[in-house]
Image: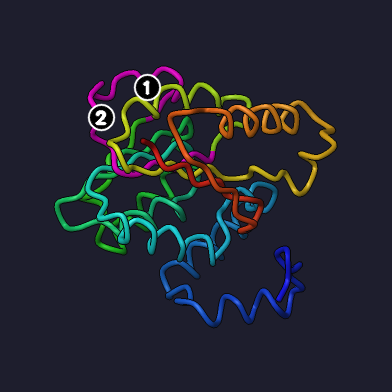
Amino acid sequence: MTLKSIPLTDDLHRYLVAHGTPPDEILSDLARETLELLPEEASMQVAPEQAAFLTFLTRLLGTRQAVEVGTFTGMSSLAIARGLPEDGQLTCFDISEEYTSIARRYWARAGVEDRIELRIGHASDKLRELPRERYLDFAFIDADKTGYPIYWAELVPRMRPGGVIAIDNVLRHGRVVAPQSADDRAIAAFNDDVVADVRVDAVMLPIADGLTLAHVH
């Protein structure tokens, strides 16, 4: 028995990934291409166990309508889209045509491009174009950290009762306990706001760089 999550060594991380649903050839190729083309930005891609978890969670929730804020080269959107039924819809928001052009190729290769709508532009503006009723089953936030409160404010009122919002990078490599940068401070403040928000129940999981799941009332 342990009272806290154990730290992951490289060997233990490999074991963990191997004993869940492992990345298939498409996900592996996407990870490899992202690292080769964008070595400085590749860390923005979700971890393999996180991708598997997103697919699992999307299916578990019976998701039909989903939103992603921050698409990059498409790993997380591909994972979410794979968890949708054939008539499900994922709306992605990103500011980069360059990065998402890679995503589009892999969506097509995986046969899920018909489930994904990509909207290019600042999500702080573009999210306001979504219907205002409570229709979303699932949302994933993984974009600029100072924008999290804006995305949260737009998404929570659009989530159906029982819908879930997943928020990435909530631990900032452990720096939330002693913030060192503007992004660290923004996430630390955002985490406090989420746990105080009476519209949700939230749990923070030590997956990758920290993942909060918020269940909307």
Within-10-Å neighbours for mark 2: few <14, some 14–19, many 20+: some
- Element on which disc 1 rests: helix
The quadrant where residue 100 appears:
top left
Is 84 drawn above or below residue 3 in the view shown? Answer: above
Q: Nearer the viewer, residue 3 or 167?
A: 3
- Element on which disc 2 rests: loop
x%, y% of residue 31? 54, 63
x%, y% of residue 62? 25, 55
Residue found at the very far left of the displayed protein: 87
On residue 126, which mark appears? Answer: 1
Left or right: 37 with respect to 118? right
Q: Nearer the viewer, residue 116 or 52?
A: 52
Q: In percent of the image, x 58 and y 60: which residue is there? A: 47
Q: In percent of the image, x 41 and y 17: which residue is there? A: 125
Q: In percent of the image, x 55 and y 81: which residue is there? A: 18
Left or right: 161 with respect to 189? left
How many numbered discs sit on the rendered protein?
A: 2
Query: Is residue 121 one of those drawn in magenta?
Result: yes
Distance (Cα) linking label 1 and label 2: 17 Å
Q: Nearer the viewer, residue 207 or 44?
A: 207
Is 197 drawn above or below residue 165 in the view shown? Answer: above
Q: Quadrant of the C terminus?
A: top left
Residue underneath mark 2: 134
Q: In the image, which residues are magenta?
A: 120-142
